[in-house]
Image: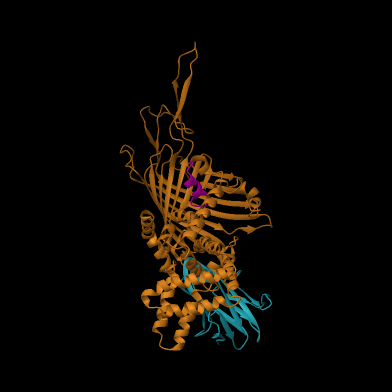
Chain colours: A orange, B cyan
Amino acid sequence: MNKTLLGILLLAVMTWPVWASAQQPRAINFPNGQCEAEFEQYLNDYRNATDDDQRASAKTSLAQLFDAKTQAGCVVSLILAVYPNQVRANLFLGFATVAEKQTGSASSTSGTTNLVSKNFTSRALSVANEYGALTSSTSGQTTTVSGSLDQLFTAIEHASKGTFVECAIKTIPGVFCVRSGALSFLGRLSYSASLDLNQPSTITGTAAGTAHGSTQQVTGTQGGNSFALSQFTSKFFIWAQKPSEKDFLNALNTQTESSDTPAARRDLVKIQNLADKDGAWQVWLTEALQALVSAPAQTVSTELSVQTKKLTTVLIAGGTPEQDLIKAALKYSASLAETAQAERAIYDKAAWDKPILTFEYDYNTPSNQPTNSTFRLILGKSTKSWKITGNVAGSIYNSTPSSSIPGSGRLRDIQFGVEGDHNPYALTNYLTATFSAAYYYQNQESPAILNVTPSSPISGISFTGLSSSATQVFTQKGTIHVGQLKLTLSGNSSSGWKFPIAITGSNRSELITKSTIGAQVGISYDFDSMFSGKSKQ
Amino acid sequence: MCVLTADPSDPTGTTFLVSPAGLVTIKITSLTGTVIFSPKGTTVTDSSGKQSSGTSFPAPDTYSFPTSAGQAYTLETEYVCVPPNSTGRLNEACAGGVKLADILSTTNGQIFTIKA
């Protein structure tokens, strides 16, 4: 008997904090900073009001923060704040669904047969590629991986269903968020790495077991790297002219994807309207506002919690099950993340039509040549018909060249280039022509150098009369002028084919000091375009 | 000339009265960044649910719609915040025009009732 009583007492003592906290209302704030700032401002406006008109105005502004018709994001953030456990459970299920979808992505999805599946098996990188954290392209034996640093954030944001977002659109309490300023800074930095996949590898055979007459089993192992870095480029966006509202509108009009946010918002309004059929929601709003403006400053957060719980009770009483209410709120939160991505894309698109100044650093490791670094300033500007890009650059050898090379120094060359791309002409409904012209100037301050091993000649280059002890060869210094005219014919945006024709002329190249002129013709076809329409069905 | 006033009988602050009936113009004032209307999602419908004709966007941040005396309309707005942390305020486009609502990064769109 005493033991039973002791057990009951012990249980009561142990569960008291849980029971007590369940009985006492928990203080909450708006998880979204902008909503919280507005709430505090209008509450202060009400307290500091000197007449009824000012009080009424402040109260109306406060009312809008609790109305899904005007501030759906603030309402959502409050609803989610009072259901922490259910939100966690739903988010976990959401993540599981995302992960399953990722591994089962359709083969026709753009970018699935890409670098990541070829060279890396990391799940994180796979997700990064699928969600646009990086892009990859392959030309011959060279694969280029590129992206900007904010794309990594975007990829995580896309997969996180609102749990890792830009702070301005955060509506789920307690989740991670990144400040908009930090994100803008990351967006200024981009990178590109080219990997040469055609690296020589050696196979070493080790004898296994005993010899059988003239035969013997061996175990082979492959040596060497499967790829090597051939170039790394990083760009820092220095300055851009601010786009106008019209530029943003033009960029918005080119967007084809529609957002889920309006539909998610209307679902919330429907839930509120159901609860307001008999005026219950408006009664709640009137009472809640009065309670909040009357509450002492130190208990406002607790009062906000009490009123939010009452709000959820009213919404559920209107005919929406609790689980559906949480799901609708989470759906809005997740859709906001996608909308923010689209808005960033609009911003970038509009910004690219304005003059932009960028600094670029290239780390080059050309085959059989000393490594060098190029520092480049790029200015881009669009006019009504043309997109003009100009750049100036200086290139240095990463180590001082041999003093036995006459006229050599760390400064390798100085470059200048300008390119004009005319906006596409629609020749017919199915045929588009794009014209571009480019000029490039290079002053070779130090001779171009090739590393050679006489016993192992460079593929594609043969030397006559080269000393057997030579380890480096160099060419004449001088200026290089290169000009190119290019016409690209292509089908409409869904056809996927391109047919470029170019004429290029130069007075010399780095290695050959004679002038050349030549024509280049190519054809390319994006096989993804065959399936892109079907995959959306 | 300003024609909109807040309906004092509506505690939610989302109903506005038009007097005299006619063309109403609303305008977004961007406070941080840039906020513009999404033309696809900004509409006015009459009480029968029919979309009003004669609406226009004189500028990306401005929307005009006609009203007739005795009619009630639902004004649904949709915004684009570039960059996403942009905020703004929606007012009637006139000197001292009534404030319809604040626009936050999480707002996306708003629904108002306009009574002429």
Q: Residue furthest left?
A: A403
Q: Is residue A93 above or below residue B3?
A: above
Please identify the residue farthest to the front as the structure is shown: A1
The reply to whether residue A238 is visible in this rendering is: no
**Residue A75 x/y as whole percent:** 50, 70
Q: Is residue A495 left or right of residue A439?
A: right
Q: Give the x, y percent position of residue A383.
A: 53, 64
**Residues in magenta?**
A120-135
In this picture, is A423 found above or below A123?
below
The residue sitting at the top extreme is A213
Say if residue A278 shows up in the picture.
yes
> Which of A241 and A50 lies nearest the eye of the viewer?
A50
Establish if A481 lies above or below A315: above
Residue A477: x and y, percent? 39, 43
Most foreground residue, A8 or A110: A8
Q: Say if the magenta span includes residue A128.
A: yes
User: Is A183 or A444 nearer to us in this picture?
Assistant: A183
Can residue A358 be found in the magenta stretch? no
- Where does the image place residue A204, in percent across and percent down from the top left? 44, 25
- Which quadrant does the N terminus of chain A fall into? bottom left
**Residue at image location 46% in from the left, 87% down from the top:** A53
